Amino acid sequence: MSLEVIQDNLCVNRLIERKKKEVTLESSIIVPDVKPDIVKAIDLSGNVCIYKKELINGRVKIDGTIDSNIIYLVDSGDEIIRSLNSNIDFSEFLEIESDVQEADIDANIVLKNMECDVLNGRKVNLKATIEINVRLYSNDGISILKDIKGVSGIQKLNKMVQLNSMIGKNSTKAVAKENIILNPEEKIVEILKKEVRIINKDFKISYNKVVAKSEVSVKILYLTEDGKINFVEKVIPIMGFIDMENVTEENICDVKYCMKNILVKLNNTDENSIYLEIEVEISCFAYETKDVEIIQDVYTPFSNISYKQKSIRAMVGLQNINDAYQIKEQIADTEISSSRIYNVSTRTIINNIKIVGTKAIYEGEAIVRILYESSEIVHIDKKEFRFPINYEVSILEGMKEENLDILIDVEKYEINSQSNNNIQISIELNINTKMFKTVELNIIDNLEEKELEEDNEYSIIVYFVKDGDTLWKIAKKYRSTVENIKKVNNIEDEDKLSINQQLFIPRYVEKAKAI
């Protein structure tokens, strides 16, 4: 019989490269003629949207915008505050070292800081610092040697590996639309600020689809004709159906949300309502965990088998962990506690990740900004408070920071005044950690069988173990088998050999060959 190779085809996922870049964006904003001059910026806020991610000539290109709001103190007149809304568009390139033409791009952008310089009463310069985190993944189809037939006395050195093989990827778009009707007695002048968050993320598997469910939380601060500041909150459920052939509940699904567009505007003044429309892209990568037996080495006592080896990198031990994290703090501030609070906003920043044994420790901050009624002349002011985040998660042994992907969502926050003039702040976070290990695998390729040029007619050889020897190496060298050597020498554990240990190496004789 001629040599017959049986192979197994797999889609192996791996992390190609990870890039991080901090960028400061600038935009000049002209105050519209219908609005009064600006004296001072009181509060800055923004929401990040990503329009497009692509790989172009060895660079990752990210297109997006920061939907920003500036609440400012006016120059004169009966009015106290007004607002400016502006989109800071950006198109950023990240250089990559890997020579790849195609890859799956996972991008996350964090708005770290905003600053505003008043150039004159009609013009301001807005700066926004963002941190762009990009991961490139490849999904390579490979053929793994599964078995060899048609060769007498074939000996195989196998290694069992639990690989994460991707079974599919896809995305869909979901749109949250709502008309918010306000109190008819409150004649709204303009929107001062908007905060948009995606919360309560969940999914389930149903009939070759990943059904992604979440809610868009929108908080809008607005100004009325009589100079009052008020807010309205709305939670809108969204759902996306992602087609995914052969996906099952046993698979690991990495579902991510990305805001692509935010539209919040006043309707006709007669309606006294706000129209909002938020477009969200929902993507999913589905993986199966598969036990794969990989042949590392092969030989036969009766012929010469030659082959080539290629090394591949693969993802193993993939996990997606969601965990709730609560922050409860008190603020001793009599000025805020005795005043009307107009708005509270919360965001998070991770400053450092430490790996200690089988633990990953995230160190960061929850930043709480409070906009309140001030007793000063300006009547409105802002204070910012920072609270530490120290979170631990169990990880696989030997895992590196580059194999950790963390995403923190602010699910809920509350602020309550207490009788002792303290303020109680409660924040609920959802911390999602995607973790995996990257391993190097040696894959056998291009097998060929040739006749032996010579055949030593020995029946047994006496051999003394040397440093670095294994029973497999010895058996292959003398065209015996591991099992025969163990049997002749009464060896129970083939991994326990000692230097200068005497071994009897029997010649391999196949019964079918002796007939």
Image: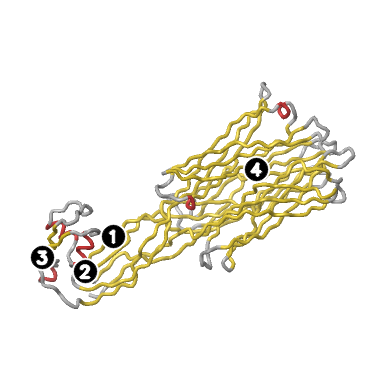
Q: Residues within 10 Å of mark 2 (few under 14, many from 20)?
A: some
Mark 4 or 2: the one toward you: 2
Mark 4 or 3: the one toward you: 3
The quadrant holding residue 143 is bottom left
Q: Are marks 3 and 2 in contact (CB under 8 Å)?
A: no
Of the numbered discs 4 and 2, the one sitting upstream in the chain is 4
Residue appearing at x 19%, y 56% in the figure: 499
Q: Residue 371 location, x and y as percent?
A: 73, 36
Disc 1 target residue: 158
Disc 2 target residue: 300
The quadrant holding residue 288 is bottom left
Q: CA distance from mark 1 to mark 2?
A: 15 Å
Q: Secondary structure at mark 2?
A: loop
Amino acid at circle 3? Ile
Of the numbered discs 1 and 2, the one sitting upstream in the chain is 1
Q: CA distance from mark 3 to mark 1?
A: 26 Å
Mark 3 or 2: the one toward you: 3
Q: Secondary structure at mark 4?
A: strand
Q: Residue 271 location, x and y as percent?
A: 81, 44
Q: Are marks 1 and 2 in contact (CB under 8 Å)?
A: no
Disc 3 target residue: 460
Amino acid at circle 4? Ser
Disc 4 target residue: 217
Q: Residues within 10 Å of mark 4 (few under 14, many from 20)?
A: some
Q: Secondary structure at mark 3?
A: strand
Q: CA distance from mark 3 to mark 2?
A: 17 Å
| Vertical comparison of 324 with 451: above or below | above
Q: Residue 91 location, x and y as percent?
A: 66, 60
Of the numbered discs 3 and 2, the one sitting upstream in the chain is 2
Q: Residues within 10 Å of mark 3 (few under 14, many from 20)?
A: few
Question: Could you say which is closer to the camera, residue 95 or residue 446?
Answer: 95
